[in-house]
Amino acid sequence: MDARSDRTLKVTTPTDREIAPPDRLVHTELFDDDWTGGETQVTTVLVEQGGKTTLTMTILYSSREARDAVLKTPMEQGVAASYDRLAELLATLGTPAMGKGAADS
């Protein structure tokens, strides 16, 4: 779900493709008002090392043009802000949070 500045909501329809606990999830997303040219495939991988977990999310778009269009939106900043909020929440729970700049990788 994407809360937009004009107070409308963009909702994606996810479909799980692969669930491999505890470290891998693959799903597709399709925006209700599709402007990216089709489904995107999202792969999330969790790797634990030295008591810390690194989350890597890779998004595959239907075309290079779709990817480039997404990169022109504020989506990257929104994702980074979401990870920053998650780090703040984890800190209140006494859980080691992500390192600074984790959302940039």
Image: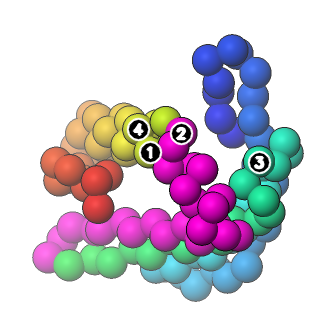
Find the distance from the CA under tag 4 to the CA under tag 1.
Answer: 4 Å
Q: Which residue is mark 3?
A: 35
Mark 3 or mark 4, whichever is nearer to me: 3
Front one among 20 and 62: 62
Residue 97 appearing in the image? yes
The amino acid marked with disc number 2 is Thr
Q: Is residue 70 left or right of residue 16?
A: left
Label 3 near label 1: C-beta < 8 Å? no
Residue 93 appearing in the image? no
Q: Residue furthest front?
A: 65
| Mark 4 neighbour class, 10 Å CA radius: few under 14, some 14 to 19, many 20 or more | few
Q: Which residue is mark 4?
A: 77
Q: Which residues are magenta?
A: 50-73
Mark 2 or mark 4, whichever is nearer to me: 2
Label 4 near label 3: C-beta < 8 Å? no
N-terminal label among 3 and 4:
3
Front one among 26 and 73: 73
In this picture, is 19 found above or below 93?
A: below
N-terminal label among 2 and 3:
3
Label 1 near label 2: C-beta < 8 Å? yes
Q: Residue at x 69, y 14 (%)?
A: 6
Q: Position of residue 55 (x, y in %)?
A: 37, 66
Q: Which residue is mark 1?
A: 76
Label 1 near label 4: C-beta < 8 Å? yes
Query: Is 32 within the magenta?
Result: no
| Mark 1 neighbour class, 10 Å CA radius: few under 14, some 14 to 19, many 20 or more | some
Q: Is residue 101 left or right of residue 39?
A: left
Find the distance from the CA under tag 3 to the CA under tag 4.
Answer: 19 Å
Q: Is residue 43 left or right of residue 61?
A: left
Front one among 86 and 29: 29
The amino acid marked with disc number 1 is Glu
